[in-house]
Image: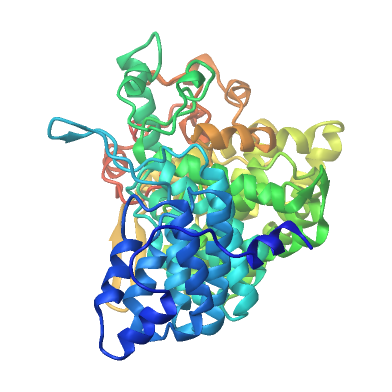
Amino acid sequence: MTESYVFLSSPPKKTVRFGGKVTEVLSKYSQGNTQDFELLKHQLSDPEIKDVQIINWLHELRISVTHLTIEYEQLVSIVLKLPWLNRSKEVVEEYLSFLGSLVSAQTVYLRSCINMIVSHFLPSRVTISEGDINISDSEDGDEDIVATFNTCHRALQIIAQYVPSAPRFLIPILVEKFPYVNKSPRVLECYIHNLLRITVYFPVLGLEILELVTEKLLKIDVNASRQDIEDAEQNSCIANSKNCGAEHDIFNMDEDEDPQQRGTGVLFNKMVHPAAERLDLALSVFFAYIKEICFLSGSMDLNKTKDLYRDLLAVFDKLILPTHASCHVQFTMFYICSFKLELTEAFLEHLWKKLQNPNNPAVIRQTAASYIGSFLSRAKFIPLVTVKACLDLLVNWLHSYIDNQDAGSRAFCDVTSHGPFYAVCQAVFYTVIFRHKQLLDGNLRIGLAYLQALNFERIVMCQLNPLKICLPTVVNFFAAITRKYQLVFCYTILERNNRQMIPVIRSSTLGSSVQTCANPLDSFFPFDVCVLKRCKKVIDPIYQPWEESNVEEFKSPKNLVQQGAIPDDEDDFLKGEMPQNNGVAMTPGSYDSFLKSPLSSVGSPPIKFLQRLF
């Protein structure tokens, strides 16, 4: 006989109490005598109730569980509010036994039981007041928080053993209990950790939980642009140049911080921007979850990895791909794809199908192209053979598109009609900019022959005029590279575009409208540099940064542009100095349109870039 079985079957110790046994109290209550019933509720509600008392009451309630119908909801509610988690092992075991008996005999309380357990996924609230000011509002002071969470997950599994349908009642409660995005980073971190942990023993809920977590993180992400985060960090460094972020740390309100950890790098990892700090912690938990699911003792579990990839891809399609302004959540796909080449190729193939499918909305096709270009350029783990295979696909698609348009009536610069075409052009240009050294490395003659075979000249000189639509940063770097290797001379077209001031035409059901906009595609590069400190440690080893040597390669004294100082550690391609087109300056009208570019376009080039002359 095991210790657990002996405990559950052994009689409880006698204690001083008032009123009769629970069965007698319930019997009297059903006959209209409520005195003992109220006394029972009062004793269970006593904040100073002892462990032995709790064990006795729970033992009797477990025996009488068949009588605890809905009319005794008040009593059950009080029992579910008992402070059982931080009690002795005997209390915890008796309480878990009671929960199992209750839900098996009275399924009407199933949701209440799950609700109680999920409420403990959040750390205890601790409020420390100084005068009229609360200086801490929601942090855990419980040193045994890990044990608490372990017990909660055990309770959910026990309930599911008695009621197999319990998991389907769980999702609405998890949604309801999800903390507001403005809550403490620690609260968000704990809750997301517990949600992801549920997927381990309730795999049927995996997809729904991943959707819930991703949806909440996206709401934070779109409200914390890369530029805002960088500005906050830079301002903090300027405020205290000797110790970046020291002033922020002095007024730190997070109570989960161990004072002994000061100076060990914990505070150094904190983000100054509040939303960025929440996102950084939450995504760090997400990355740890992905790695733990996919690897066991250092070896990859291929089946689990594939299953998780499929779920993350479904979440990507539903939530991330349609979200234009996200900066960091998409790195979950970036990270899992780095585990195995087959996942990388599967992701690229998936994006390619999205792009070439004419039944998809144009904005989705354009975004898929942006993801392909950014992924090919930034993922260090993608081999050159895969990059070339993707370039072949994209360039062949562009040539076929041009073939189909040459005889058509819409063979002119129209973003609405040809948005996917321009997005693919930009993806190709962007990839060539980042990968041209690798493409030409080794055997220059073979590399040049490959690039010449792509026939960029036909693409840039076609009637659709992609050099007018793509981002000027991308266009200028591409023009400099192709000029150096004599692949195509773009500057003639750039000069003509500037002289003619060709407008960007947007067609709609109300007619065509003429606009001037620096980013008519409203394009962005989804895998631009990660600026979250904790996440960077995970992403940087598999990430291809923008190398300043790429700028020096095309820079000459005569076309150097004077510009504002940029931090040396900037790693954003869009913030790099651009090679100039032999002194062809941007016209005042076009420059004004840059400054008036919609601020809502989070993926657009940052202000420092917008203030440069070309």
Q: Can you see residue 418?
A: no
- On the image, the x and y values in percent for residue 18 come to 33, 65
Instruction: Please state which of residues 568 and 28 is positioned toward the viewer in this rendering.
Output: 28
- On the image, the x and y values in percent for residue 151 come to 57, 55
Side of 458 relative to 612 (left or right): right
Q: Please name the residue shown 34% across and 45% down the image.
A: 125
Q: Can you see residue 182?
A: yes
Q: Please name the residue shown 30% across and 16% down the image.
A: 239
Instruction: Please state which of residues 287 and 85 is positioned toward the viewer in this rendering.
Output: 85
Q: Please name the residue shown 40% across and 81% down the image.
A: 24
- On the image, the x and y values in percent for residue 216 come to 43, 57
Locate the C terminus by quadrant.
top left
Q: Is residue 305 above or below residue 169?
A: above
Locate the N terminus by quadrant.
bottom right
Instruction: Please state which of residues 588 and 341 is positioned toward the viewer in this rendering.
Output: 341
Q: Please name the residue shown 48% across and 40% down the image.
A: 280
- On the image, the x and y values in percent for residue 494 come to 47, 42
Side of 466 relative to 387 (left or right): left
Q: Is residue 484 above or below residue 198?
A: above
